[in-house]
Image (tube, helix red, strand yellow):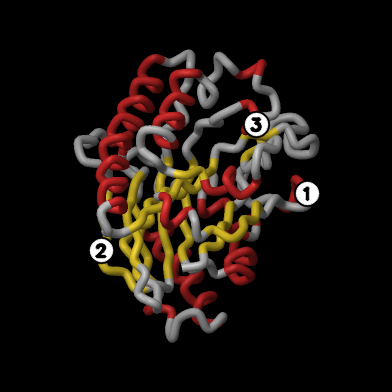
Amino acid sequence: MNGIRAAMRKGVDAWARANTPDVWCMQEVRAPQPDVDAIFDGFAADYAEAGRVEAPASLTRVNEVCRVKGRAGVGLLTDLETTDVRHGLPGLDEDVDSGRWIETDVRTPQGYTLTVVCVYVHAGNADDETKMAQKYRFLDAMLTRMGELRDEAAHGGRQAVLCGDFNIAHTPLDIKNAKGNVKHAGFLPEERAYVDRWLGEYEFVDVMRDLAGDIQGPYTWWSQRGRAFDNNVGWRIDYQFATPELAETARGFVIDKAPTYEARWSDHAPLTIRYDV
């Protein structure tokens, strides 16, 4: 979101009314709880007006505000039946790690159950050892939980999908200027190796890449500086990583890149994937 309050001023409510996703994961909400509640109330009214729920109160709303003011924050809305919600990654209790991970177990009307994780990984900074240590600590904790989700899915339990801003471009196909960024956070070899493990050892599927094939991009984030957006000098750092059974049901994706720089409500564009479950 790059701040949900800023996104509201720039027109995210119009996107919400036009799309009303079955599950909507938001990252970098960056707002105190009363403001999140008020904005989520408005989104719930949009879902009710669209006929997705009987009344605004029927829409499930989950969020976690970061304990560091003005940082991070994740949120999730869904019109599906919700059976459980979990906040945070076990073993991470520092304030800077809050507002970055929520899990919601949902069930479709046909009885298909899955775990949806809303993720906002630390951005990191290659010139700041503390920030990189925070990022790697978070990624290590993710590995433990992803292993558990993989094992549950492989043994007949809930399938899972991790949706969010992972702040890592995996390969040169995921970044416009690969050579110029090999020493920058977000494209460091050490960071990219985690994605290698998610897709290899942990058997998750990069669903959008699986659908798009080996093409350049498409990107989901463009710097606010210069003419990066206009020239499509972007990064693909927003993903959906799904367990194999769920990934096989993916039918298509959309990246809602705004038509102009002025029309953007974030420096990211929303990634929507349709699953036939």
Q: Is 148 or 116 nearer to us in this picture? A: 148
Image side of residue 40 versus residue 255, left or right: left
**Is the C-beta separation of discs 3 and 2 under 8 Å?**
no
Q: Picture coordinates of residue 164 (x, y %)?
A: 47, 46
User: Residue at image x 60%, y 37%?
Assistant: 236
Residue at numbered disc 3 = 173
Q: Amino acid at mark 1?
A: Thr
Name, please, the residue furthest toward the bottom: 54
Image quadrant assignment for residue 12? bottom right
Q: Is 24 or 223 nearer to us in this picture? A: 24
SS of the residue under disc 1: loop
Residue at numbered disc 1 = 260
Image side of residue 133 versus residue 49, left or right: left
User: Residue at image x 32%, y 54%?
Assistant: 103
**For the residue carrying disc 1, how many other residues have a C-alpha within 10 Å: few (<14), some (14-19), or many (20+)?**
few
**For the residue carrying disc 2, how many other residues have a C-alpha within 10 Å: few (<14), some (14-19), or many (20+)?**
few
Earlier-in-chain disc, 2 versus 1: 2
Depth-wise, is mark 3 or mark 2 nearer the camera?
3
Earlier-in-chain disc, 3 versus 2: 2
